[in-house]
Image (spheres, grey):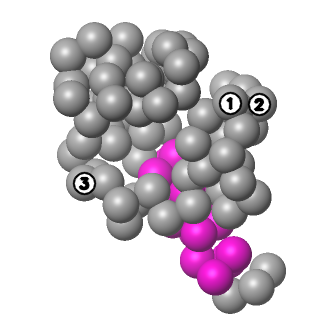
Amino acid sequence: RGCQGCHTVGLGRAAGPDLFGVVERRPVDWLKSFLKNTPEMLDTDPLAMAMLKEYKGFRMPDTRITDQEIEAVLHYLQLRTSERRAGE
C-alpha cells in the first residue's frame, strides 16, 4: 500500500513517524482504530491530532484495509522491530 514511502521501521523518521516499536508504544486497539479509520482519528483523537500537528498537517491517507490486513501489518511491525533489535 505504499507505507514505506512515508514510514520506516528503525531507520528514522520520514514523512511520517518511524514505526519501530509502535506496537509497544501505542495500545493495539488504538493502532487498529487508527488504521481502520485514519481520517476520523486525525480529526477527533487527541493523540492522532498531536501527531498531525507534529508532522505539520501531513495527513496519512485512508488505508482502506481489512481487519485481517491490519492484523498482518501489526504483526509485521512487531517482527521488524524484533529483527532490528536482534541486529538483523
Return the residue at label 2: 5
Query: Where residue 27 is drawn, which disc sits there?
Result: 3
* Distance Cα–Cα, label 2 vs label 1: 8 Å
Furthest residue in direction bottom, as rendered: 86
Q: Main secondary structure of the magenta part?
A: helix
Please tell me which residue is depicted at 52% across the width and 46% down the height of the picture. Answer: 73
Left or right: residue 23 versus residue 85 is left
Magenta part of the chain: 72-85
Asked whether disc 3 touches disc 2, contact meaning CB atoms under 8 Å apart, the reply is no
Give the crowd class for mark 3: few <14, some 14-19, many >=20 residues within 10 Å: few
Q: Position of residue 43 (x, y in %)?
A: 28, 12
Query: Which of pointers 1 and 3 lies earlier in the amino acid sequence?
Result: 1
**Which three-letter amino acid code belongs to the residue tagged 1?**
Ala
Asked whether disc 2 touches disc 1, contact meaning CB atoms under 8 Å apart, the reply is yes
Please tell me which residue is depicted at 21% across the width and 25% down the height of the picture. Answer: 45
Specify the quadrant of the image occupied by residue 30.
Answer: top left
Which label lies toward us, 2 or 1? 1
Depicted 82 relative to depicted 6: above or below: below
Left or right: residue 15 versus residue 71 is right
Depicted 71 relative to depicted 80: above or below: above
**Which three-letter amino acid code belongs to the residue tagged 3?**
Pro
Q: Secondary structure at mark 1?
A: loop
* Distance Cα–Cα, label 1 vs label 3: 22 Å
**Which three-letter amino acid code belongs to the residue tagged 2?**
Gly
Give the crowd class for mark 2: few <14, some 14-19, many >=20 residues within 10 Å: few
Return the residue at label 1: 15
* Distance Cα–Cα, label 3 vs label 2: 24 Å
Q: Position of residue 50 (x, y in %)?
A: 33, 30
Asked whether disc 1 touches disc 3, contact meaning CB atoms under 8 Å apart, the reply is no
